[in-house]
Amino acid sequence: MKDLILKYIDQNKDRFVEELIEILKIPSISTDPQYAGDVRKAAKLVLENLKQAGADNVELCETDGHPIVYGDKIFDQSLPTVLVYGHYDVQPAEPLDLWDSPPFEPVVKDGKIYGRGTCDDKGQMFMHIKALEAMIATDTLNCNLKFLIEGEEESGSENLENFITKEKEKLKADMVIISDTSMLANDVPSITVALRGISYLEVELTGPNVDLHSGVYGGTVGNPIDILCEMIASLKDENGTITIPGFYDDVQTTSDEERAEMLKIPYDEEKYKKGLNVDALKGEAGYTTIERNTIRPCLDVNGIWGGYMGEGAKTVIASKATAKISMRLVANQDSKKIAQLFTDHIKNIAPASVKVKVTDFHGGEPAICPTDSVEIEAANKAMEESFGVKPICTREGASIPIVALFDSVLGLKTVLYGFGLNSDAIHSPNEHYGLFNFYKGIETIPLFYKYYRELKQ
């Protein structure tokens, strides 16, 4: 089977990349309403690619927001059915001046595809479509497949819960597979078995009713920018511990044994710092870098602005100041509860000189996948055959809120089968995805289905 798949990939690899590039050219930015037409255009192109790969019952499913692409390949009801999830929407590309090439004009250089969405998640989602094509062409499909490819993952998957609740029968399966995570390295394959959750909010402070002359009014009124900075600074203490009352109440304690296992993960701190061009790392005291971004929650400011933002000088005290803040959550923390704790605390510490408005944009729950399942065993076997070495089970600091959603609504466990690398600059300028990783994903996914069928029967 492996040889047949490899031969098919080799014969069609240039076409695979060309087809991916056509999808990457579309600025399907789901968070910005002005790109709604492009998001729909991307959905239609994904739909056409799914049809051409050989899927049946392919359709564009409308939601109250962006459409969902569905398709399936059911050839034997007695065999396991896998629900393949991915997303075709992407993050905004700003700041544009930091890109070496335009974000929606993909280029291939040094063995990588550069462009917004290459790794997150168009490139990884597209691997599954091409794997389906390869399996149908070589008559090696071992499981029934259903595809659910959405266009709102980067904006909180607002309409996905309603869709999967309504379409439970259509989406009935034995498990879910998602390629929207990373590996440790190309020679150290890994499988993600835990994700952090997220609460994402915006804080707006309003002081005077208009911007004021900083000479005439300086020293007499509260400056919303100064106050917002002071409030944000107070959200962590000198040890990097978050100071919101009740924030850590539900955090799941990680055993000493598991922490010891995490120390075995290959990690070079000097290389890590060099790759980020920083001289020192910073985080919660008492934890390693890997622990800080996997088993511990965190709080970060994602954007902050107010007052005059243009070139040159303008001496004003701003009427408003705004910050966007995300909190990554770990097992047992609830995104809605954390959002409320944050909102209550921010309002409580705000001085009387400003008015406070907090907007809860979106949240998602943390997820942990059992490592002793048939699904993880199949994933391990497939990666070992494909890469030639046994993969490592790891936790990841990012969030995929729909993993917990699939469990709670559909009762399905998820295998997080990502082939990207942490160095792929997702959400950042110059995002890229290695051709090695792209092709290796197309090779490994069919092997997963092979082993999953064998272990389930």
Image (cartoon, rainbow, N blue to C red):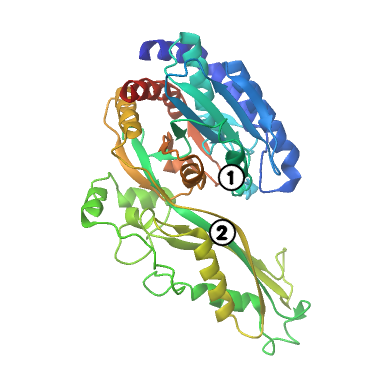
Q: Quadrant of the C terminus?
A: top left
Type of amino acid under label 1 = Glu
Looking at the image, which residue is at 50% across and 13% down?
Answer: 136
Of 106 and 241, nearer the camera is: 241
Looking at the image, which residue is at 46% across and 57% down?
Answer: 328
Disc 1 element: helix
Q: Position of residue 214 (x, y in %)?
A: 72, 82
Q: Position of residue 183 (x, y in %)?
A: 38, 38
Q: Position of residue 33 (x, y in %)?
A: 73, 47
Question: Which label's residue is closer to the chain start, 1 or 2?
Answer: 1
Disc 2 element: strand
Image height of 384 relative to 142, above or below: below
Of 172 and 41, nearer the camera is: 172
Q: Which residue is mark 2?
A: 200
Image height of 213 relative to 305, above or below: below
Looking at the image, which residue is at 61% across and 32% down?
Answer: 106
Q: Are marks 1 and 2 in contact (CB under 8 Å)?
A: no
In this image, 95 relative to 9: left or right?
right
Looking at the image, which residue is at 56% across and 36% down?
Answer: 168
Q: Quadrant of the N terminus?
A: top left
Q: Which residue is mark 1?
A: 161
